[in-house]
Image: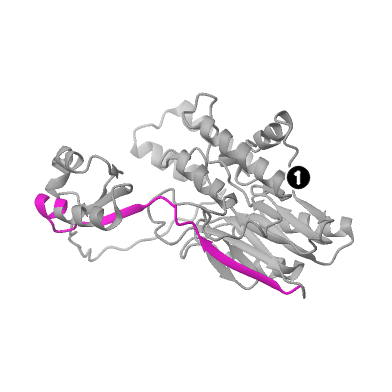
Amino acid sequence: MIDRMNAIVVSDVHLGNTRIDDTKMIKALCDLFRPQRSYKAIIEEVNTFIIAGDLWDRLLNLNHPNLSAIIQGLVFILRECKRRQIRIYVLEGTKSHEWAQSELLVTLNRAASIEADLHYIKDLSIRHDERFDLNLLFVPDDLHHDHSIIYSQVQEKFREKALDQVDLAIMHGMFKHQVPAGLNLPCHDNSLYEALVKYAIFIGHVHIHTELGKIFAQGSFGRISHNEEEPKGYFHFWFDQDYVFHTEFIENTQAELFITVDCEGLDTSQTISKIAETVKQYGEDLTLRIKSEASNPIFANLNELYTAFPLVRFSEPKKIVEKKKTKQVELKGLSYTPIVINKDNIGKLIEERLTRKALDDPKLLKVIADAVEELR
């Protein structure tokens, strides 16, 4: 009898993203359930499959070219989870990505009579997993712009359940250490949530894999843009027979490649040669971006490049604009006197400004004078 949780956590799959091939992404997701193709043959041990937000990238129309492949893949996953007795938790991610489209999983599960153990979570909640006597906190994205209010809402859920701690948390959002340097973005407080969780917090949204304390960010399951050169993948976690918690990051080796080739200072032939070296190293199934000065002649000969590498997907070049040197002029003998504006002088200041601009119409000045008088 299974008495310990053993789970896979993925997030930020972004089905429907226009920069990737959805058929490849859904295949990579399905391969988690194919031991012969899996990145690591762990599916036989797994009893829980968690999607920590952003399964979808955008609102998809019924005539989307890859929707059929996506549906087939989702049905396969539901059937495999049913066959293997794997419970599925799907957390709602960023609203502008998700559009509550994971309702499709609920519909497919019911309409196709699959009856997988599916739990789609759209609201802040604490769920009790009766299989292992574990309490799980679920925090979707976009609950409120003020994260102190979100934390207050979380505390209220704990009071409702009469709990001081949960065993695990599944979240979509950002913690302080995930905020890029130099940016002041709303985020969750690490210490507050770590105090609420006994074992681990798995969080989606930021596409970079990080681990800090109890906080495990798996990053995006695949690669969907440039500047994401780091390994992509998912977490596998489990409790052993002594209830010791273990986790490991497993790389998605099927993640699409987005490569930036630095061609600064190169002419057309040198640029093509460098791209040829890159293609030889990684193969032609990649998305390639040229980084170079805006004056690089290759940008006037892109058709030559496309002809030479017909199977490579080229994205918008990263053109470096040369900074123009500016001449600094020192102004001598000038002084600045700040003007203090208050209810006593505002009328006179407006009148003087209008007079300088030849707008000192008596009727207009009278309206302004009356308005200023009301302020006093």
Q: Residue at x 53, y 62 (%)?
A: 250
In-front residue for pair 208/142: 208
Quadrant assignment for the C terminus: top right
29 over 137 or under it: above or below:
above
Q: Is residue 350 magenta?
A: no
**Placement of the N terminus among the 4 image quadrants:** bottom right
Residue 345 picture location, percent across and down: 51, 49
Q: Is residue 19 left or right of residue 164?
A: left
Judged from this view, the residue extending furthest toward the front is 36
Circle 1 packing at 10 Å, graded few (<14), some (14-19), many (20+), is some
Residue for badge 1: 117
From where the camera sits, is residue 322 visible?
no
* Residue at screen point 84% across, 56% down: 130
- Residue 74 position in % (x across, y down): 60, 39
Residues drawn in magenta:
243-272
On screen, residue 361 versus residue 285, left or right, reads: right
Q: How many marks?
A: 1
Q: Residue at x 72, y 36 (%)?
A: 114
Type of colouring: one colour
Q: Quadrant of residue 62?
A: top right
Q: Is residue 269 left or right of residue 352?
A: left
Percent x, y for residue 15? 52, 41
The residue nearer to you, when weighing 19 against 149, is 19
